[in-house]
Image (tube, rainbow, N blue to C red):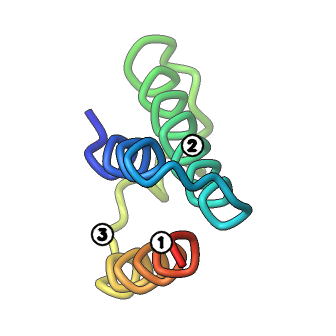
Amino acid sequence: MHPAFYFTLFTILYTNILNGWMIAILMFKTVDLFFKINIMKALFEDDNLNNDIRAVLKEPLSPIIFLTGLGLYPFLMFYGIN
């Protein structure tokens, strides 16, 4: 479903570290997952998504979006574990 969420959960349980950084990572991942599920539900099941949001969803993603995630989560994970 969402491997990064499970990886974060496993890291928290395996290291037994639950500080502010780890809570922030888990919160970001949970909100991200919840937001994606709600958008998919509104788009495919309810069919009541705003036309502006539909237009945004049709736009291609910039590579900077992926680089932001690649730079943000390891940084937070490093500070969370140390």
Foreground tag (3 vs 2): 3
Q: Secondary structure at mark 2?
A: helix
Query: Left of 10 or right of it: where is 26?
Result: right
**Position in image of residue 47 (x %, y %):** 48, 19
**Which mark sits nearer the N-terminus, 1 or 2?**
2
Q: Secondary structure at mark 1?
A: helix
Q: Residue at x 61, y 44 (%)?
A: 31
**Type of the residue with mark 1:** Met
| Snapshot quadrant of residue 45 | top left
Q: Residue at x 53, y 47 (%)?
A: 32
Marker disc for residue 60: 3
Q: Residue at x 57, y 43 (%)?
A: 51
Query: Left of 60 or right of it: where is 26?
Result: right
From this view, report whether residue 62 is shown above or below residue 48: below
Q: Residue under circle 1?
A: 77
Marker disc for residue 65: none
**Type of the residue with mark 3:** Pro
The answer for how far apart the CA atoms under marks 3 and 1 are is: 28 Å
Q: Alpha-carbon neighbours of circle 3 within 10 Å: few (<14), some, or many (≥20)?
A: few
Q: Residue under circle 2?
A: 51
From this view, report whether residue 59 is shown above or below residue 76: above
Q: Residue at x 51, y 12 (%)?
A: 46
From this view, report whether residue 16 is shown above or below residue 48: below
**Type of the residue with mark 2:** Asn
Screen quadrant of the C terminus? bottom right
Q: Nearer the viewer, residue 70 or 40?
A: 70
Q: Do the numbered discs 3 and 2 sit on residues whose CB atoms are within 8 Å?
A: no
